[in-house]
Image (tube, rainbow, N blue to C red):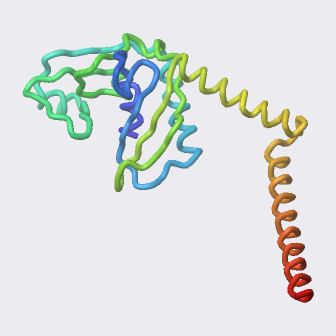
Amino acid sequence: HSALRQVLGNHVEQRGSLVNDEILRFDFSHNAKMTDEEITEVERIVNEKIRENIKLDERRKVAFKEATEELGATGLFGEKYGDYVRVITFDENYSRELCGGTHVKHTGVIGFFKITIETSVSAGVRRIVAVTANKAEEFVQEQVALVNQVKDLLKNPKDLPKAIESLMNEKNDLTKRIEVLENQQVQNIKQDL
């Protein structure tokens, strides 16, 4: 959950690296691949916080000890912090972190959040890549267009997964029949020889 709380805080406005105003990469400790249900739950939580339009609470020049011990702010992997830090909060019960980056003024500016990739970075460390705002809308529209294209190819079946499963089963059956016929041809050629 601490990783999830930081997703909103880590959404930055600058461009340049993989983390910008339309795409983000987030590494977190987790010992297994995230399930589809976990990914859906993360998206639900983040989008709920986006819709809440939470105002940024920024405190500058806070003593590191006060920020971490009294305020409970968390830092990021491998980051080095000085004696004084900046504390970024989006809902004190949800996301409070040490940060030197640029943040949105309200969470509503983010618009929409969609995870596109979940992968392993190293042992015990997972990575999500997500899109936001217009990129998230474009991603969803592309996925819908792809599904519609598949439906058109399959003559608009009522149950798309079942239609695809049926095609796969038919393909497997045909492959087996071809193997049998090829084997029969080889036997015929062998007999003729």
Side of 68 where 5 appears, left or right: right
Quarter-of-image position of residue 168: bottom right
**Does 53 appear above or below 117?**
above
Side of 53 where 183 appears, left or right: right
Between 153 and 2, the one lying in front of the other is 153
- In the current view of this chain or complex, which residue is farthest to the front? 193
Residue located 88% across and 69% down the image:
177
- In the current view of this chain or complex, which residue is farthest to the left? 83
**Does 5 appear above or below 112?**
below
Relative image position of residue 117 (x, y in whole percent) = 51, 39
Between 172 and 88, the one lying in front of the other is 172
Image quadrant occupied by the N terminus: top left
Residue located 84% across and 52% down the image:
167
Residue located 12% across and 31% down the image:
65
Relative image position of residue 58 (x, y in whole percent) = 26, 15
**Does 64 appear above or below 37?**
above
Relative image position of residue 151 (x, y in whole percent) = 82, 35
Between 158 and 190, the one lying in front of the other is 190
**Does 74 appear above or below 54?**
below
Residue located 86% across and 40% down the image:
154
Image quadrant occupied by the C terminus: bottom right
Side of 43 where 149 appears, left or right: right
Total marks drawn?
0
Relative image position of residue 176 (x, y in whole percent) = 84, 69
